[in-house]
Image (spheres, rainbow, N blue to C red):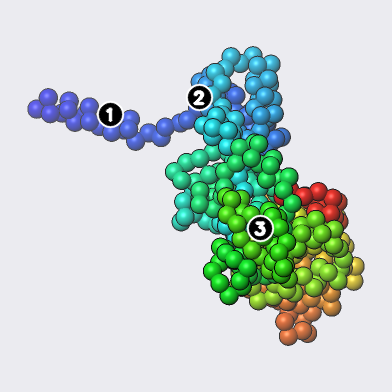
Amino acid sequence: MKTFIYSLLVIFIISCSASRPVVEQVSPMQPTIDKITKQYAPDSRTALFQVTATGNILKGETNLPIAKTALLEQLSNDGFTIIDSIDVLPTLAMEGYHHSVVNVSVANLRTHGRHSAELATQATLGTPLTLLKFKGGWFQVQTPDHYISWVDAGGITLMKENEFIEWQQMSKIIFIKPFGFAYAKMDAEGATISDMVYGDVLAYEDRVGDYFKVRFPDGRMGFLLRSESQMLKEWAAQRNPTQQNFVETAKRLTGLPYLWGGTSFKGVDCSGFTKTVFFMNGLVLPRDASQQAQVGELVSTQNGWDYLQPGDLLFFGVPAKDGKAERVVHVGMWIGNKEFIHSSKWVRISSVDPAAPNFEESELKRFLYVKRIKPQESLYDFRVKSYY
C-alpha cells in the first residue's frame, strides 16, 4: 500500500512539473539585435535580417552585409564574445548564380516557396531579379523595387555576373499592347513562342519587315509585331507623366479583374493597379499600398477635394488610435470630377460625391489622406535610368 501511495505521489509531482509553462529566457543580446533590425530592416518585405541568439551563438540570415557588420561591432563593443553563424545572402551554395531574368510573360512571386502560397507580387518578362537562395525548386528573389518573395525555377533564367552584364548591355524591345504573342516565325497566324502583356521586355536582334526579331533570356528566338512593340529607349524617352496621361493610362485598365498580388494586365490588386499605371508613365512605385503611402507629399483635403490633381493617390484604411499604428489597406488614383479609379472587385471608377450614382460610401468612410508623387520621388524614372 505504501508503495502504491508513493508511486501516485511521484506521478503527481511529475505531472505537475510537466504542466508548468516553460519560460524562455531572452538573450541579453536581443535588445541590440532588435535595434539593428529596426535601423537597417524595418520592413521585412524589402529587407532580410532574421537573427537569433542562443547562448553566445548568433544564427540566421540577411541580405544586408552592412547590418551584420553593424551588429557584430556593436555586440563586441558591448563586451560580448560571440560565435558568428549568420549567413549573408546570396550564399556560396548559389555557385555564382546571383542574377536571374524573368523568362515568362508574367512570373508569379509568392510569400513562400510553394504554389499554394499567397501571391505576393508579379514580375513581367525581362525583369531582373536578384537571387538570394534556393530551396525545393524555388528561388528566393528580390525585385528591382526591393520586394522579397519566391519564384518557381520555371519562371526565370539564371545568369552569372558576366552573362547578366552581357544581357543588360543588349538593346531591348518593350511590348506596348495589353495582350499579345511572340511568334515562332514572321506569321501572326502561326505558332507562338509565348503570350505577352504590356511591359514585357526582350532583347532586340533585328528589324525585319513588320516584325522585330527578339531574344528571350533563355536564348529562344521569336518575332513581335512592330505595331505592338517599341524600342525600349524610344518608349522611355516618350514617357510624359502628366495629369492627362495618368488618367488615360489608368482607364486602359478599366475592367481588369481584381487579383490579390497582381501587378500586370493579367489582374491587379489595388496597389498593383496604381503601380502599373505609374509604370506605363515611366515611373516605378513601391509595391504595397502601405509602402506607396510613405512616398510623396501630402495634399490637403481639409476644405474638400479642390486641391487634388489627376494622378494623386488616395489612401484608405484605419487611422492610428490608442497606441495602435495606422493601417493603410487600399489605394486609388484621382482622375478629377470628384472621381477616383481603383481596383476593387475589378478596376472601376468611383465617386466621393454622395449625389453621384457611383458614390463609394464604404471607401469614403475609411479615407485617410492623399499623396502627390513627383517623378523624382519614385523608385525609378525610366527617362533617367532603367533596370532592364
Element assignment for label 3: strand
Residue of label 2:
54
Q: Residue at x 34, y 36 (%)?
A: 19
Q: Amino acid at mark 3?
A: Val
Q: Which mark is residue 13?
A: 1
- Which of labels 2 and 3 is toward the front? 3
Residue 256 seen from this side:
yes
- Which of disc 1 and disc 3 is earlier in sequence? 1
Q: CA distance from mark 3 to mark 1?
A: 76 Å
Position of residue 226 in the picture relative to residue 44 (left or right) = right
Q: Amino acid at mark 1?
A: Ile
Question: In the displayed image of the protein, which residue is found farthest to the left?
Answer: 1
- Which of disc 1 and disc 2 is earlier in sequence? 1
Q: Residue at x 72, y 82 (%)?
A: 358
- Which of disc 3 and disc 2 is earlier in sequence? 2
Q: Nearer the viewer, residue 55 or 18?
A: 55
Q: Residue at x 63, y 46 (%)?
A: 129
- State yes or no: discs 3 and 1 in contact (Cβ < 8 Å): no
Q: CA distance from mark 2 to mark 1?
A: 30 Å
Q: Residue at x 71, y 58 (%)?
A: 206
Tell me where residue 229 appears, x and y as whole percent. 72, 65
Tell me where residue 348 appears, x and y as whole percent. 69, 76
Tell me where residue 282 appears, x and y as whole percent. 79, 58
Quarter residue 159 falls in: top right
Residue of label 3:
214
Q: Nearer the viewer, residue 361 or 44?
A: 44
Position of residue 357 in the picture relative to residue 133 (left or right) = right
